[in-house]
Amino acid sequence: MTKKLFSDKEFYNKLLQLALPIMLQNLMLAAVAASDALMLGSLQQDAMSAVSLASQIQFIQNMILASIITAASILAAQYWGKGDTESVKKVFAISFRLSLLADIIFWALCFFTPNLLMVIFTDEEELVSKGIAYLRIAGWSYLFTGISQTYLALLKVTDRAKESALVSSGTVILNIILNAIFIYGLFTFPSMGIKGAATATLIARVIELIWSFSYSLRKDFVSLPFKNLISFSKLLSYDFAKCALPLLGACLFWGVGFTSYTAFMGHLGKDAAGANSIAAVVRDLVCCFCNGIGSGGGIMVGNELGAGKTEKGKLYGDKLLKISVIIGFISTLIMLLLTPLVMAFVKLTPQAHKLLFGMMVIMAIYMIGRTINTVVINGIFAAGGDTLFDMYSLAVVMWGLAIPLAALGTFVFNWAVLLVYACTCVDEVGKIPWVIFHYKKYKWVKDLTRS
């Protein structure tokens, strides 16, 4: 059976060509958060915790942008498989306009009401003040995030995943270098601490936008002409909304839910917030593997469905499901192997150190569910436009089970930190049977394109 699973060379060549650049892109993006945490953590635990909490604002923004850009990628992948380049441009024009609106809203929130945003996540005055200092600078970078992500998604869908990864990786490396310079005060620059991390992020996002936009000016690349940005297609807009609205609901459910997990840790004290900051960074690094497989595999399935090859799309889905289970257990092993390395490297209080160890062990189990759900829900289901399932599953498992348990443990029953943390991880594991059952119905096998 294993031999048969890995015998399709065409499938794996396509998957690696798409997934590896996306995986690298996700890894490099996670590396920025890791560098922020490690560099600021080496100076002061509170600085690291404050930035981790403040970054939840961009996390929510990214969830909204993800629903917009994923909807565009789902439709565009099918039209690209069909060979309809003009429809690809029109779909991403819709994404451009909506992403720009989201960018402006989140910049305004960070610029005008940073204090209101920070008190949502913690009641520690020192963490609030440090977080405000970060948001007042980093908030400007939120003006550019959606636009650059739209251009990068366009590159991925149109078989330019390598160029997309190059832009993301290059700007991430720049961000990390600038982090070191501004945080520590290298090369005669003053040590800026939290403000240095925010400044580095802002500069990197500006460079990312310029670099990604420059590809649209090349003759051999699919571009977004001005006429596409100001023109409207009623039918495509309807298809986009039909795909994007469930995704937006799911992203907000997941994003706000995940942010509430961070808020629970913030209300359990500085040690819990500090340990959770490091655990979240490690989780995001390990999740890069399943994110790459899910995104790359989803594009492959979407190409086949859009080309009318539904049986081949179904076959690809079956292979991806089996691969996700294997990667899930590999991710668990990686998490366990990383635990002693992380414990030896980070500087935390003794209590926070103990909490971090427990969180890492809990996350090792969590990674099995996270990997399977990411590949199947965000990759396979999304490829066929089956975006409602994610919202339903999050409403039931996350909001009906995990969040109430964690909230009661934090504010009512005063449970131990690790027990509350375990409650925040139960949703991914709890969804697995439901996800597999829904997959086997094959309702996700759909051609979404129009003539």
Image: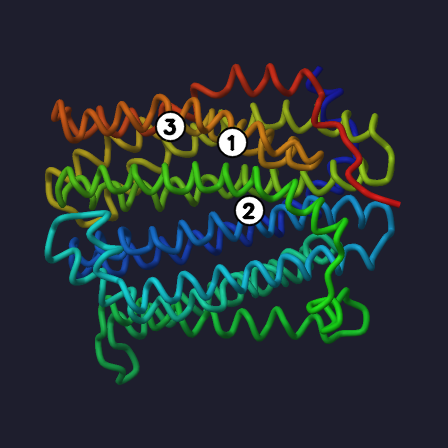
Q: Which residue is mark 3?
A: 399
Q: Check disc 3 and give the amino acid type.
A: Trp
What amino acid is found at the position of numbered circle 1 in the picture?
Met
Disc 3 residue crowd, few under 14, some 14–19, many 20+, Cα 10 Å: some
Residue drawn 37% across the image and 28% down it: 399
Q: Who comes first in sequence, dot 2 or dot 1?
A: 2
* Mark 2 element type: helix
Label 3's element?
helix
Q: Is residue 243 left or right of residue 42?
A: right
Residue carrying label 2:
67
- Which mark is first along the chain, 3 or 2? 2
Q: Quadrant of residue 276?
A: top left
Residue shown at 71% from the left, 71% from the top: 216
Q: CA distance from mark 2 to mark 3?
A: 19 Å
Position above or below: 123 against 144: above
The percent position of residue 261, horizontal first and vertical second, equals 29, 37
Q: Residues within 10 Å of mark 2 (few under 14, many from 20)?
A: many
Q: Few, some or many C-alpha atoms within 10 Å of disc 1 (few <14, some 14-19, many ≥20)?
A: some
Q: Earlier in the sequence, mark 3 or mark 1?
A: 1
* Circle number at residue 341: none
Q: What residue is at 60 percent from the left and 63 percent from the top?
A: 97
